[in-house]
Image (tube, grey):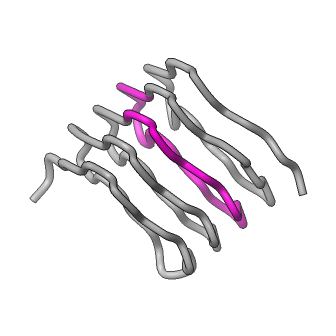
């Protein structure tokens, strides 16, 4: 399992995702990033991306702010500001046992 840290970045105007973690990625910290104006996803966890700590990020103006799909499990999504996206946070049915805590959410879609 790979360990990585993604912190203190400004990530904007990317084609698919600002930050994407997949295929057995274990991130010890995804924090203090400003992620904005990405075409599809601000922060995207997919395909067995597990035990991630996504915290203290600002995610704005993407189709989906933070998305977990494809058995992305046991992650903590906390203290993020997720505003101005069509969808603030989305998890599919295979992404279970995740913790959402103290996030400020404001999506543009009803």
Count of numbered badges drawn on the protein: 0
The magenta stretch spans residue 92: no
- Position of residue 4 relative to residue 47, above or below, is above
Relative image position of residue 88 (x, y in whole percent): 29, 52
Q: Position of residue 29 (x, y in %)?
A: 66, 43
Q: Magenta residues, as a range?
A: 35-58
- Asked if the stretch drawn in magenta spans residue 50, the answer is yes
Q: Residue at 19% across / 49% down in the picture?
A: 107
107 vs 56, left or right, is left
Seen in the image, is 6 located left or right of residue 10?
right
- The residue shown at (67%, 33%) is 6
- For the N terminus, give its image quadrant: bottom right
Q: Residue furthest left?
A: 110
Residue 79 x, y percent position in the rendering:
39, 48
> On the image, which quarter does residue 81 sit in?
top left
Q: Position of residue 59 (x, y in %)?
A: 37, 36
Locate the C terminus and report the quarter of the image it occupies. Answer: bottom left
Give the quadrant of residue 38: top left
Instruction: Decide: is 28 above or below 67.
Output: above
Residue lying at 70% horizontally and 63% vertically, measured from the top left: 51
> Where is residue 91, by image quadrant?
bottom left
In the displayed structure image, the side of residue 32 where residue 25 appears, left or right: right
Q: Nearer the viewer, residue 69 or 80?
A: 80
């Amino acid at each position: 399992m790979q360990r990585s840290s993604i912190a203190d970045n400004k990530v904007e105007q990317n084609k698919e995702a600002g930050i994407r973690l997949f295929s057995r990625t274990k991130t010890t910290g995804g924090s203090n990033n400003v992620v904005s104006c990405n075409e599809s996803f601000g922060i995207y966890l997919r395909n067995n991306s597990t035990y991630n700590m996504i915290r203290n990020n600002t995610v704005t103006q993407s189709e989906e702010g933070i998305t977990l799909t494809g058995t992305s499990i046991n992650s903590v999504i906390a203290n993020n500001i997720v505003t101005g996206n069509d969808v603030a946070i989305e998890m599919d049915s295979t992404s279970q046992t995740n913790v959402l805590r103290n996030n400020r959410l404001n999506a543009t879609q009803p």
